[in-house]
Amino acid sequence: MLAICAVAAAWAVEPAMSSQVSPASAPQERRGSACWGLTRAGGKRSLLYDAFMLLPALLFLVFLVARARSSLRKLFRSKSNIMTTYYAFLWIISILNVCWCFLEMWQTRHGQAAITWNVMSIGTRFGMVLLEVSVVIFLSQGYLTSSWNALMHTLTLSGTVAAIDAILKAIYIFWVGVPLFVLGDDAGDGKKWGFWFIHSFIFAGVYFIILMLPYTKWRDHLPARPSFYNYVFILFVFNSVAVLGSLLLCFGADFGHCLYSLAGFSYYALYPPLLYVTFLADFFKEEDFQLEDIYYSEMKDAGYFDADWD
């Protein structure tokens, strides 16, 4: 990881320029690209694109609110530190995701608050990377550990990875002056898209190795849960599309914006639901089954099923 950081830092050696960080400084929109027209307007993100980003994030937050009562009841009864921690993280990331989308839409119209935008982007990605990595680490153990120490060990490892990732991005944005989270007429910007290429390539490579492990001698040490491999495969696809898009943009191909925007949309919009389905859905389904048993027992005690025995 240190070698990667050194390579990335050596790639971008130009001094920082504050004007590079501001979304308002994005160049004018290019012509002749359908993807560019969909995702950009006047050199900035299109409000239509931002609305598509916001809708699934907002719907999932509404889903969490609707299920909050039964979910909290299950967490209180189970007293599971692990599930409670991940459920709390999921709420935090979902709220940050919605705030991030609203701030993006506000910037599209006003083009201000560049520092707030970059801090929000780094913070949101930090939380998502922490969850992304920690779920892989925890599920790879096959639920063999459930103690508080095991949870802290998992969060420490994933938090270290997420912190290095966030610090590197902060250095690029605020010190080197590379606008990582500002998309404009930047096809051919090797420093920016080279960073995202390396970043996405590392994550895609790790997920590819995990997907190949079941075909090696270590397969008996891996979890048997299909949801784990579905989770890893989907993240591998997200990062692979980002790799291809950033590579095309490194060479100045505008079509890379289409692929990279697709990967970004998929990650921000679909990762929180993916985490819920993979890690929490089965846990909360048990609450529904328990409620059905309670209702059945109450109805049986009340004599509703006596006629069935006559």
Image (cartoon, rainbow, N blue to C red):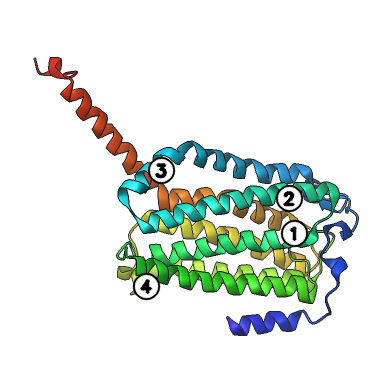
Type of amino acid under label 1: Thr
Binning the other alpha carbons within 10 Å of mark 3 as few (below 14), some (14 to 19) or many (20 upward) gives many
Q: Residue at x 71, y 68 (%)?
A: 247
- Residue 250 location (% of width, % of height): 76, 69
Query: Where does label 4 land, which residue?
Result: 216
- Relative placement, left or right, of 294 versus 22 is left
Q: CA distance from mark 4 to mark 1?
A: 46 Å
- Which label number is shown at residue 308? none
CB under 8 Å between discs 2 and 1: yes
The secondary structure type at the circle numbered 4 is loop
List the residue tagged with mark 3.
71
Visible residue check, residue 212: no
* Number of other residues with Cα within 10 Å of mark 2, as a class: few under 14, some 14 to 19, many 20 or more: some
User: Residue 286: which quarter of the image?
Assistant: top left
Q: Which residue does the image show at 41% across and 58% down from the upper left?
A: 228
Q: Amino acid at mark 2?
A: Leu
